Image (cartoon, rainbow, N blue to C red):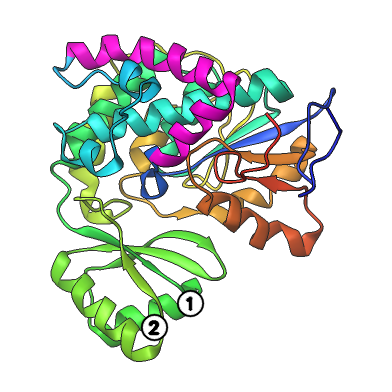
Amino acid sequence: MSTRSTHGLPSRPSGKRPVHLFPGQGDFSVTSLVRAVRTADVVRDAVGEVFGELDGIAAEHDLPLLAARLLGSRPPGTRELAEAPAGTLQLAAYGASVAVHRALSRVYGPPAAVVGVSFGEIAAVAAAGVLTVADGARAALDLAQVLAFCPGGLTVLGCPEEQAGRLLAVAGAADTVVAVVNDDRSVVVSGPHADLVRVEKTAEELGVSAVRLRLPFSSHHPALAPQAEAFATLLRAYPWSKARCPVFSAVARRSYLPDDDPRLGLADCLVKPAVVPAVLHQLHTCRPDMLLEAGTGDALATSARRVLDPCGGPPVHAPLTDLDFAW
């Protein structure tokens, strides 16, 4: 095998120091996962192993079993998972991230660090060994239970954070906040549906793209403090271990310290904003030579390129959407 593809993607180097990026729920695609399963044996094996374990958790909660279907000839679509009983989509997204992480680790070695953005923090702490894969799945289902009581929605705006703040003011969306800063071109806002309708209309008038995420809840909103407390309480049921590598949180805007309580950190994702650039700029401390998105899309990788390329950062890849990625 050659050392580089025609697109400059890495092959199977030794001594690499990758960092794995774990995205939130807004960029989940079954199609790209299934394509990778069918074209890369290492991904197929990882999906079979991870979802084989998660099927036991799904059975505990009377949810659909996914391992055989994802590996079979008629896999479920993303919409089908979204319309399945509550928690199915979260379990699928979590399992996909853990499986991609496992496959990447087998090809390129374990990550020097992991980065979690919003929901992706659950998979990140599991990848770092803070939670077992099974308990991470249970935590994802706990969050799904809590999200059912998080009214409102989320909209992606194609503008910088400062402009988004002005847009919210013009729209009169007093109860809507900037929830996620992806990069200098994209943010996510969180708030009541009525507010988001006004925000989206104002964005159209100002020539700013606005896309409502297909997620039936809000998040990263200070009004969700009771839900965050409930989630933190549910997380106390699981044993927590020392991380095998640094875990960077876009919500904490830094890596977790030994004295931090990761349960409170995960709960903070419901009430505090995630600022992706702030945490990406700190990754130089791990001396990474590449960043790999441990998810099914490429939105987080795209943001990482925008943030780090001007600084001469390491190459960034989204393995499940980079069709020439060398597995």
Q: Is 106 left, or right, of 130 in this rendering?
A: right
Q: Which residue is located at x 17 percent, y 64 percent?
A: 192
Q: Main secondary structure of the magenta part?
A: helix
Q: Position of residue 115 (x, y in %)?
A: 57, 38
Q: Is 304 left, or right, of 88 in this rendering?
A: right
Most foreground residue, 50 or 167: 50
Three-letter code for the amino acid on which mark 1 is drawn: Glu
Query: Can you identify the residue that label 2 sits on?
Result: 166
Quarter holding residue 65: top left
Residues at discs 1 and 2 in contact (Cβ within 8 Å): yes
Q: Position of residue 289 (x, y in %)?
A: 80, 39
Query: Can you identify the residue that label 1 sits on?
Result: 162
Most foreground residue, 80 or 222: 80
Q: Is 310 left, or right, of 220 in this rendering?
A: right
Is disc 1 surrounded by few (<14), some (14 to 19) or many (20+) residues within 10 Å? Answer: few
Spatial distance from mark 1 to mark 2, Cα to Cα? 7 Å
Q: Which residues are magenta?
A: 31-60
Compared to 25, does 95 lie above or below?
above
